[in-house]
Amino acid sequence: MNTIFKEEVYKQKVQKYLVIGSILLMAGKFIAYYLTNSVGILTDAMESIVNVFAGFIGLYSLHISTKPKDSNHPFGHGKVELISASIEGLLIIFAGITIISEGIKRFFNPGIVEKLDIGIIIIILAGIINFFMGTYSIYIGKKYNSIALIAGGKHLQSDTYSTIGLTVGLIILWFTKIEWIDSILALIFGGIIVITGILILKKTITNLLDTADSKELNTLADILEKHRQNDWIDIHNLKMIKYGNLFYIDCDLTLPWYYSIRQGHKACSELEKIISNNYSSKVLLSVHSDSCDEKYCSYCNIPICPHRKAKFIFHQQFSLKDITKSDEDKNEKY
C-alpha cells in the first residue's frame, strides 16, 4: 500500500468518525429543542442536519477522490472534494435561510419556551464537542491537503462560535423571560450561518475555476530562489493547479543552449527534486526545457561560460511576477 493511498484511507476514517459524531450531536440538539420549544435551539438543531448531510457527502467525495487517474480523468478525481465543499456551502446557506424564516414567524407568533436549563446544558456540551471535532478535522485537512475536511472542520467550528452566542442569549432569556429574545437569536445566528455558507462556497468556486493561488505561488518562488542552480538561467510560464491533495506544476526552464540532452534532463530532474523535497504539499512537476541566447547573458549566473556574448550585469530573482510570465511576455521584454 503506497503512502498516498494510506493517507486517503486515513482521511476517510476521520470523516467517518465526524459523521458519527454529527449524528449523535444532531440527536442531542433535537432533544433539547423538543424539551424547550426554543427556536434559538432549533437553529443549532437545523445546522446539525446540514452537518450530517455534508458529512456523508464529504465521505463519498473522499472515497471517489482515491480513485486513480484514468483516460477520462488524467489528473485524477481530486476535484470531487471541491464539489463536496460547494454542496456543503449551499446546504449551510439553505439552513440559515430556513432558520431566519422560522425566527421571523416566531417573532409575530411567539411560542412558550420551557426547561431552558436542560436545553442550555445540552447545547454547551454539543458546542464543546463540535469545537474539538472541527479543530481535528482542520488539522487533518491541512496535513493531507483535503479541502473537504478543512471545509467541514470550519463549519463545525463556526457552529461552536454561534453556540457560544446562542448560549449567552438563552441564559438572558432564561432570566428575563422576554420571549422575543428567542426570535432575535434565531435571526442573528441564522444570518451568521448564511455568511459561513457563502464564504465556503466562494472558496470552492475559486478553486473549481483554477484561480491562481498567489500564496502558494509565492512559496514556490521562494523555494526556487533559495535553491537556485547556476545553470537555471530562467524559469517562466509557471502554472500550478490543485487536484485533491496534489499540486500539478508546469513550467519552462531555460538552460545553456550547448547542453546535451543528458545534461538538460539532469537539470530538469534536479529542479523537480528540489521542489518535491522543499514543498510541504505533494507535487507532480512537468518541465519544458528552453535553450538560451544572448539576451540572457546580462543575468546568466554561470561563472565561466565559453559562449557568453554580453557582460554579466545583475542577478535576476525568481519572483512571482517573473516565473509566471508567458513566453509572449518574456519576448516583449526584450
Image (spheres, helix red, strand yellow):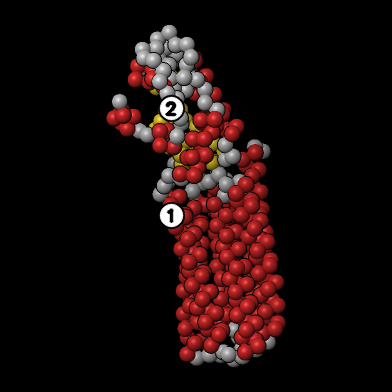
Look at 51% across and 67% down and name the residue there: 92
Marks 2 and 1: in contact by CB < 8 Å? no
Q: Quadrant of residue 38?
A: bottom right
Instruction: Characterize the local packing of mark 1: few (<14), some (14-19) or many (20 or more) Cα atoms within 10 angstroms.
Output: some
**Residue furthest top as drawn:** 306
Look at 45% across and 44% down and name the residue there: 214
Comparing 148 with 80, the one in front is 148
Q: Earlier in the sequence, mark 1 or mark 2?
A: 1
Query: Quadrant of the image for the C terminus?
Result: top left
Q: Residue 205 got which mark?
A: 1
Query: Quadrant of the image for the N terminus?
Result: top right
**Horizontal side, residue 133 vs residue 218: left or right:** right
Amino acid on which the number 1 mark rests in the picture = Ile
Q: Position of residue 268 (x, y in %)?
A: 49, 23
Q: Position of residue 306 (x, y in %)?
A: 43, 8
Q: Position of residue 16 (x, y in %)?
A: 65, 57
Q: As displayed, is residue 323 above or below residue 123?
A: above
Look at 51% across and 30% down and name the residue there: 225
Q: Which residue is labeled 2 in the image?
A: 316
Instruction: Name the element at disc 1.
Output: helix
Instruction: Characterize the local packing of mark 2: few (<14), some (14-19) or many (20 or more) Cα atoms within 10 angstroms.
Output: some
Residue 259 seen from this side: yes
Amino acid on which the number 2 mark rests in the picture = Gln
